[in-house]
Amino acid sequence: MAIDIKNILSFFGIKKTFEISKEELEHLSSETSSQEKNDPYIIDLDFSDEDSPIAEEMLTNIYEDATSLFDYNHNNLEKVIFNSLEHHKTLLGSHPEIKTEVLYYLFKERSKNRKSSSKSESKLVDKIPQDFKHAIGYHLLNSKIRLTSQDFTYFFHKWKDTYAYDYPLRPLLRQLKKHSINYKISPELNVSLHSFLRSRSIQYLSIKQHMDAKSIIHRVILENSKINLIPSAYVFQLLPDPFGVHVNKLISNMSEKYQHNISKVLKILSKNIHQKSFIQINEYLEKIHQKKFDDFSYSILRKFAYLRLRNVTLRQKEDNNEKDIIYGVYEHVYQENINLVKGLIQLHGYRNNQNCIKLISKILERCYAVSIGSNYGATSQSLGKICIQTLAFQFEDAGKHELKTVYENTSFRLIKKQIEIISHKLQEETGISLL
């Protein structure tokens, strides 16, 4: 029996969700469930469960400031301007260890069976709404704070098991990304991040938040793993969506010389492309057979043009409903991989590889598609604009002819609009009318 989907999702706000049967749901969840059951790692988080008097006092003072200066209740947190609260300023200006202690207090797990004394129940800190504590945690994680691998292990463990809604994930991920640039993550944190990616809690994020979180964590894991690789190992791996997995497999089957140079080219392509980038890419291509790279880049572009996206199960809690709303959506392509394809298309334009024109045209139409699973996700349209610009300015008459054909045949209004914009720009710069 199909599950009743109550909410409407869309990559661009106009697509309907699709229904998934009970059998399909079990299949989608089986990998996560089996991995959790078979996970041999036990993370021993040796932290005190005692209340922190410093944290309690600071939170209480901040809350009293807010209630005295603002007409605050549980539903109007937006009225509180935290930067105007003196005790909040004191907290953000505190020593990093004190801020970390307050974070531990905010994220500390409270057992449902834990008995509170009458004295504990009368504490003001226990009556502070959770969204208020959430906001303080958000400000703390956005401040100057020094977190260790042990801290991250603890926080991700708490989020995975308890706090799917009760503390901010995005600033924690930013802190993790910054930490991983300067320090090697510990084996315990590595295990915790893998466990986090397999947890049910991550299913409560929206599809964009879901993909952003996985993107950052996968990149941290991949970059950290290179430290342990032998010197001859290739230097860059794509994030593991269906496109990235396919490309990584192709590179792994190449000889060492091709692995080194092609992975370096792909790393450059995943960043913002400019003229110096092409010069740098040419230096790597001179070390290998360029025809082989052209064949390789054509094959992965073709893979992207006809890419089949994976479906994923997400969850949503609803007020007064004990059971989660469970729905299926298609995963996006990771934004980093979309950026790489942008660079790859620009590179083909720079090298005038006209055999790629049809593939670029196919990718363009998918970027603006609205049917389920057809487009590449939230950043699709930015890729579509690159496709239009490259066809118009890099592939001479063949590219312009293809763009005109797309314009005449497409039913997507946004494609027509973007082609009209580029056509006007082309005429101003070259005097050639595209349409």
Image: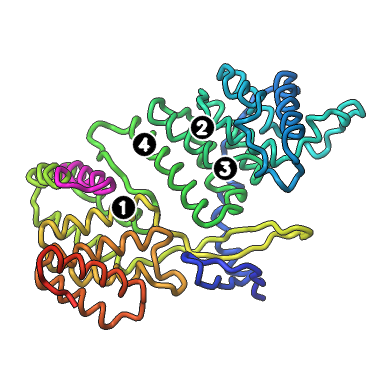
Q: Residues within 10 Å of mark 4 (few under 14, many from 20)?
A: some
What amino acid is labelled 2 in the image?
Leu
The nearer-to-camera label among 1 and 2 is 1
Local SS, label 2: helix
Residue under pointer 2? 189
Separation (CA) of disc 2 from disc 4: 14 Å
> Is residue 260 or residue 360 the one in the foreground?
360
Magenta stretch: helix, strand or loop mostly: helix
> Is residue 253 or residue 71 the one in the foreground?
71
Q: Quadrant of residue 85?
A: top right
The nearer-to-camera label among 1 and 4 is 1
Residue at image location 76% in from the left, 29% down from the top: 64
Separation (CA) of disc 4 from disc 3: 23 Å
User: In the rendering, at what x and y percent does residue 195 appear?
Assistant: 55, 42
| Number of the label disc, if any, that sits on residue 339 | 1
What amino acid is labelled 3 in the image?
Asp
Q: Is residue 33 visible?
A: no
